[in-house]
Image (cartoon, rainbow, N blue to C red):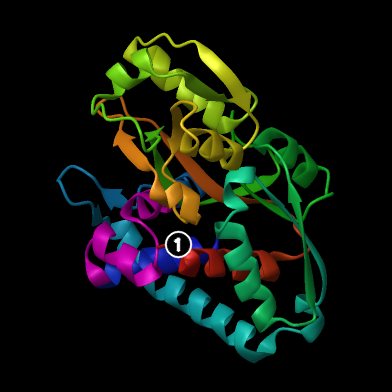
């Protein structure tokens, strides 16, 4: 359970819908849905009646709102002046998967250190499984990642955005149908060790499409560069905070066989730096457009 999830619950109660709440807390409606499912799982309780098109709070959820507001207010008061200054000083070791390093993580870290000048953030790149292991062993304080096969016991997973998979296409490709493109264009594969590589392979399998990869890349930045150079097409997440090169390329929908990547912040459940992690997550949500 996190302050972020509690804020989102209050936003839903205030606005009346997931979509309106998403505008209040500066995330997508899909991210709101993920946060609430995580909160329900943590509490082992049903917070929403989903029998209608628009989910509504259950009576149990409504009974929690007063206490939830008190918890959020107490947290805000702590952040505004009650927290010891050394809570926001020293080193914060942050892991990040490569696709978040072009814009999302740098912009979020910049916001964090501009508020807490005595805090030094060390960013460690890596694939999701490797970063999860480092968080579990205490080598990293937190990591921005997408779990490939779930989250280990003893870790706290706070999802903040869902990114739909799309077909990334170079400037010279004129076809409109993704299956036709995958049949005619060279395919650039993400490494099979990455969450994106696993998701992309799952989409191809579900869609019954066989491709012959011409190269396999470790990061979204290298994939984007290859596609931009006209060397092929690739299945990638439609990243929430893209760099200029990625934003300039065409993205083709892969529906109806859709898959998504969920990004979140991973910490140990007994993290020694919970306030910094919560602050960083708040800044991420402001950065996401």
Instruction: Give percent across and percent down for residue 84.
Output: 77, 84
Specify the farthest residue to the left. Answer: 52
Does 100 sit above or below residue 237? below
Q: Is residue 286 visible?
A: yes
Instruction: Give percent across and percent down for residue 195.
Output: 57, 31
Q: Is residue 115 magenta?
A: no
Judging depth in this view, the residue of 112 and 46 nearest the camera is 112
Q: Secondary structure at mark 1?
A: loop
104 left or right of 274 in image: left
In the image, the segment drawn in magenta is: 15-36
Crowding around mark 1 (Cα neighbors within 10 Å: few <14, some 14 to 19, many 20+) is some
Does 65 sit above or below residue 197? below
Judging depth in this view, the residue of 134 and 54 nearest the camera is 134
Instruction: Give percent across and percent down for residue 85.
Output: 78, 85
133 left or right of 47 in image: right
Q: Residue at x 40, y 19 (%)?
A: 185
Does 60 sit above or below residue 81? above
Judging depth in this view, the residue of 271 and 221 nearest the camera is 221
Instruction: Give percent across and percent down for residue 167.
Output: 38, 31
60 left or right of 107 in image: left
Judging depth in this view, the residue of 153 and 47 nearest the camera is 153
Query: Which of the image's four quarters has the N terminus?
Result: bottom right
Q: Which residue is mark 1?
A: 288
280 left or right of 133 in image: left
Q: Residue at x 75, y 65 (%)?
A: 273
Query: Which of the image's four quarters has the C terminus?
Result: bottom left
Dominant SS type (magenta): helix
């Amino acid at each position: 359970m996190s302050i972020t999830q509690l804020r989102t619950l209050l936003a839903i109660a205030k606005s009346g819908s997931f979509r309106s709440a998403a505008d209040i807390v500066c995330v997508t409606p899909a991210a709101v849905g993920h946060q609430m499912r995580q909160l329900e799982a943590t509490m082992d309780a049903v917070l929403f009646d989903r029998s209608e098109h628009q989910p509504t709070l259950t009576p149990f959820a409504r009974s929690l709102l007063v206490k939830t507001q008190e918890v959020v207010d107490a947290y805000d008061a702590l952040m505004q002046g009650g927290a010891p200054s050394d809570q926001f000083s020293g080193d914060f070791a942050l892991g990040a998967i490569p696709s978040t390093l072009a814009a999302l993580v740098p912009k979020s870290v910049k916001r964090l250190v501009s508020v807490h000048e005595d805090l030094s953030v060390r960013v460690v790149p890596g694939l999701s499984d490797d970063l999860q292991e480092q968080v579990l062993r205490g080598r990293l304080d937190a990591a921005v990642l997408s779990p490939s096969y779930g989250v280990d016991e003893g870790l706290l997973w706070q999802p903040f955005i869902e990114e739909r998979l799309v077909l990334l296409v170079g400037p010279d490709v004129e076809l409109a149908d993704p299956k036709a493109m995958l049949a005619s264009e060279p395919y650039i594969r993400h490494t099979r060790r990455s969450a994106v590589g696993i998701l992309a392979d799952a989409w191809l399998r579900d869609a019954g499409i066989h491709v012959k990869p011409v190269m396999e890349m470790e990061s979204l930045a290298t994939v984007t560069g290859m596609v931009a150079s006209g060397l092929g097409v690739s299945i990638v997440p439609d990243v929430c905070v893209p760099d200029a090169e990625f934003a300039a390329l065409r993205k083709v929908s892969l529906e109806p066989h859709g898959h998504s990547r969920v990004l979140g912040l991973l910490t140990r459940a007994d993290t020694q730096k919970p306030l910094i992690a919560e602050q960083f997550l708040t800044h991420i949500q402001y950065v996401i457009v």
